[in-house]
Image (spheres, rainbow, N blue to C red):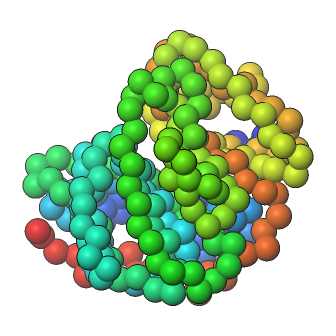
Amino acid sequence: MLKIVKNQENFKTEMDWLKSYHHFSFGEHYDSNKMNFGSLRVFNDDSVQPGKGFGFHSHKDMEIISYVTEGSLEHKDNFGNNGIVKEGEIQIMSAGTGVFHSEFNHSQNDLLKFLQIWISPEKNGLKPSYGQKSLSKHDRLNKLQCVISPRSDDSSLSIHQDVSFYVSRLENSKVHHDFAESRVGYLFVISGKLHINDMELDAKDSVKIQEEKSIILESSDSSEIILLDMPSNNDSDKSNETIKKKIGGSVSDK
């Protein structure tokens, strides 16, 4: 079963420095029917103006993934992790017992676009950790490149949950992905147009994939996608109060 969600169906936050589409309940946006999909709790598509961003704030007991699709993201946290995440790079942060961090647009001139994704961890109270990886366009060209998995290796980062992340750039090509029993998928079209099992998707559309043994993804032009493969159960669901975030808090020029 494939359930397509058009981008205009998502929640939207628009401020002078930020435009964000929220696929699930987030902050002041609440719908009891849009709390999560499996262990996927937050999927935000953020655009941040030059020199602006999210000032220091805290999180705990959440696996937080940032995938930069345009520009550069500057990260700082109370554990001494400082870095610049560039276009095509991915960042993971296990908030665990608690982390205090900020995320800013590193550029004073260019727009920053990135996906902010939260996954409920397999258990609470873990030791906080941080990781970052550069991704080559060639490595994801016309194939699904696994960039995050439950167990890290030389080619992927790891998080504390049985979720695998794949990215792909399809250039007039197609790929397929098989799902093991009792697993589901969440697909997002970053750019371009895409066909999934002969259903057409536009840029910024997402798809909830359930009870499918396999999917075929095809682009007749050029498209960028991200795909999550995860268990269908949701043993680690979090309430909206647990993950509520103050969108406009502590924002300043750099």
Residue 210 in sight: yes
At horizontal 55% and vertical 34% (from top left) the residue drawn is 145
Residue 53 in sight: no
Q: Position of residue 136 (x, y in %)?
A: 38, 32
Q: Is residue 103 above or below residue 226?
A: below
Q: Picture quarter containing residue 76?
A: bottom left
Q: Position of residue 26 (x, y in %)?
A: 53, 72
Which of the pair 112/213 is nearer the observer? 213
At horizontal 72% and vertical 32% (from top left) the residue drawn is 177
At horizontal 51% and vertical 87% (from top left) the residue drawn is 97
Q: Position of residue 62 (x, y in %)?
A: 55, 74
Q: Is residue 236 above or below residue 14?
A: below
Q: Position of residue 235 (x, y in %)?
A: 79, 73
37 left or right of 201?
right
Q: Is residue 39 above or below residue 251?
A: above
- Report how many numbered discs are placed on residues in the image: 0
Q: Quadrant of the N terminus?
A: top right
At horizontal 73% and vertical 68% (from top left) the residue drawn is 33
